[in-house]
Image (spheres, rainbow, N blue to C red):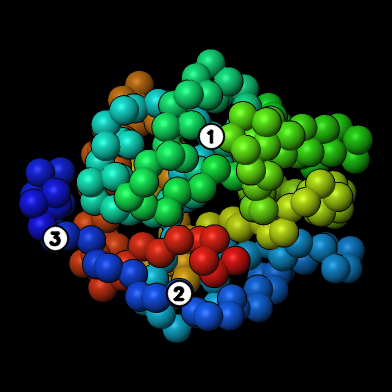
Amino acid sequence: MLAAKKWGLAEPPLEAPAPPAVKPKITTRKGFETDGEDLPPVFTTVPTKQKVVFLTIDDGAEKDPQLLKMMNELRIPYSAFLSDYLVKDDYDYFARMQKSEASGISLQNHTLHHRYLPGLSYGEQKREICGMQDVIEKRFGKRPPLFRPPYGNYNEDTLVAAKSCGVKAVPLWAAEAFPDHMEWREWDRDLHPGDIVLTHFRGKEDWKGTMPDMIRRVMNVITSKGYAVAKLEDYV
Ligand SMILES: [Zn+2]
């Protein structure tokens, strides 16, 4: 309650229910399939009836210490999808993020250089994806199970390459959060149980606010609609 007030939230975040004992079976969203079989699923919403959504933060350009503090104090879990060329000037920031004890935070794969993957050969894609698996394992001690292609663009080679270096699933997003508005994938412009919410590590130079401004805005949307933020890795 105090933390919510301190950070300017309209209401404290709702507490996530216990995750399912057995993870839901995730399949590729209709219209997002490739010809390949037995590849990591590509999805925008996790199948669940619980009123939970998942927060994912991409790229890694902005490294705002206030974000780490805010998320710790509010105990909001999130998954950070990192691109090496943006994070390599300060791996330590993300190491501190990973060590934040209060909330379930994980570091995931968003390629080495944030290229448009369908424009690359299989070998180049493999280097972009599997190279980032290696960087995250070397710097942060854990090989990511999750991978998100830059811009959400991929082809069959992408998924084959990702699978070859240990990627289990490819979460895209159902909604995108900005400091001053939301963008929605679905026609009803609303949240749904299991929706994945995308946002970015950006600062005032890139959009209309700071990282805490953006979190305040998206948390007010999530909480006012009766949703809690849960940890993606508990479901996928
Ligand atoms: Zn990105």
Label 2 crowd bin: few (<14), some (14–19), many (20+), radius 10 Å: some
Question: In the image, is the residue at mark 1 within 8 Å of ligand 1 by its beta carbon?
Answer: yes
Give x and y (percent) for residue 2: 8, 51
203 w.r.t. 195: above or below: above
Between residues 16 and 190, which one lies in front from this camera angle?
16
Q: Are marks 2 and 3 in contact (CB under 8 Å)?
A: no
Tell me what residue is drawn at x 49 percent, y 79 percent: 20
Q: Secondary structure at mark 1?
A: strand
User: Is the residue 33 above or below the residue 124 in the image?
Assistant: below
What residue is disc 2 on? 19
Describe the element under mark 3 as helix, strand or loop: loop
Q: Give the residue pinned by disc 1.
A: 59
Q: Nearer the viewer, residue 44 or 50?
A: 50
Image location of residue 48, percent across then percent down: 50, 79
Q: Is residue 228 above or below residue 111?
A: below
Q: Are marks 2 and 1 in contact (CB under 8 Å)?
A: no
Which residue is found at the position 58% from the left and 35% from the top?
A: 140
Task: Judge: label 3 CB < 8 Å from ligand 1.
Answer: no
Badge 2 or badge 3: first in the primary sequence = 3
Labelled disc at residue 11:
3
At label 1, counting other C-alpha atoms closer than 10 Å, the crowd grade (few under 14, some 14-19, many 20 or more) is many
Instruction: Give me the C-alpha separation between circle 2 and circle 3.
Output: 23 Å
Quadrant housing the C terminus: bottom right
How far is disc 2 from disc 1 in space, using C-alphas? 27 Å
Closer to the eye: label 2 or 1 = 2
Left or right: residue 55 versus residue 44 is: left
Vertical comparison of 83 with 162: above or below: above
